[in-house]
Image: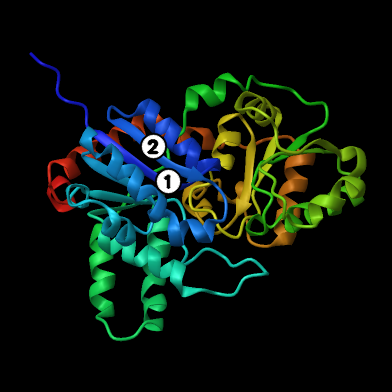
Amino acid sequence: MARPRRLRVAAVEPYFGGSHAHFLRDLQRFSTARIELFTLPARHWKWRVRGAALGLAPALAAAQKRGFDVLLCSDFVNVADLRALLPPALRAVPVLYYLHENQLTYPLSPAEDFDPYFGFTNVLSCLSAEAVAFNSDFHRREFLARLPKFLPRLPDYDRQAVVETIAAKAEVLPVGLDVAEITAHAPPVHNAVPRILWNHRWEFDKQPEVFFAALEVLASEAVPFIVDVLGESFARRPPVFDTIQARLGERVGHFGTVTSREEYLRWAGRADIVVSTAQQEFFGISMAEAVLCGAHAIAPRRLVYTDLYGGPCARLHLYRDEAELVRLLRRELSAPKLHNCNLAARYRAFDWRHVAPLFDARFKALAAGRSRAGTA
């Protein structure tokens, strides 16, 4: 018997860097579909949203002879613009619009004014795509809750119909984690002095000032710790990164972006504690990786973390304010670990070996022309 034909998926990513790039490379490895990447470098994000279709539509048109079954478009794609620029045969290919983030709820940097164009691009793309998927249920709920409040800014259309149409399409396809790879590079390490890990982007929305202020309080109390500061750094970064090494002195271990995935995971494997002080987090891959490596997670009692770390152990992992963040850190650094919360087990449910089949099933349903309701 002949093998069934592998589906062909064109993955369209105008901001191919960081977690977006890692997501697509892993999906390529674990999916049964043949996934071809159409990407642009990760820079000038606003111009990518506004103009990426001009560069990517011709590339897709040149490749259309390969017969794509599905277009997988990230939230940096203006789906309506892209489809308008594609040849007729490709316009008919079903689109799965995948939101890693959204611009309705993403916090503004101190240098930015609110521009409704980018949020409206998310709205139009949701309406233009056959399927809409969010990377967590928290993300889906937050987007749908903000949608009615955002739409009244725009006149002369049926707002309720827009909300209902998008809500009917909205589903969840979580980000996958290669659990075997993560744990293989992170053998257990016993530290004489507890190590705290910061492994987030060096940007305003991660609120590094809050994190380092908590560490300075603990340092003033002579609580022992070493902090390793990893994550992606940019030319424009919060000023605290330029001063914190001098302020914390020998308490700073590694400081800066690492050169390889293996090295990053080795540092994650050394961590006793990993902390998030983020203003936005729709899935939290860096926290997931550190937890799988054995770190104790401390995160805000909001965002996706209320879903991930809720239940009986929430009091050990979630803080409401900066004072409670200091208390959680102080307790975890100073007291014996008497708790038995296994957050790593929760994250193993997101192993790509479980998640990739969900994407494959969605691709197959779209290629077959079935609606989401028909495949539920």
Residue at 24% x, 80% y: name it: 158
Residue under circle 2?
Answer: 37
Report the side of 84 relative to 250 (left or right).
Answer: left
Q: Does residue 351 show up?
A: no
Q: Locate residue 283 relative to residue 129 in the image: left or right.
A: right
Which residue is pictured at 67% across the width and 54% down the height?
A: 203
Secondary element type, mark 1: strand
- Percent position of residue 62, x then y: 29, 40
Q: Quadrant of residue 348?
A: top left
Front residue of 173 and 38: 38
| Drawn side of residue 241 relative to residue 18, left or right | right
Q: Residue at x 27, y 64 (%)?
A: 127
- Left or right? Give the position of 326 relative to 219: left
Rounded to the nearest whole Å, what is the CA distance between mark 1 and mark 2? 8 Å
User: What residue is pinned by disc 1?
Assistant: 13
Picture colour scheme: rainbow
Q: Residue furthest left?
A: 1
Q: Residue at x 41, y 78 (%)?
A: 149
Asked whether disc 1 touches disc 2, contact meaning CB atoms under 8 Å apart, the reply is yes
The single residue placed furthest to the bottom in the displayed view is 156
From the viewer's side, name the closer residue of 10 and 191.
10
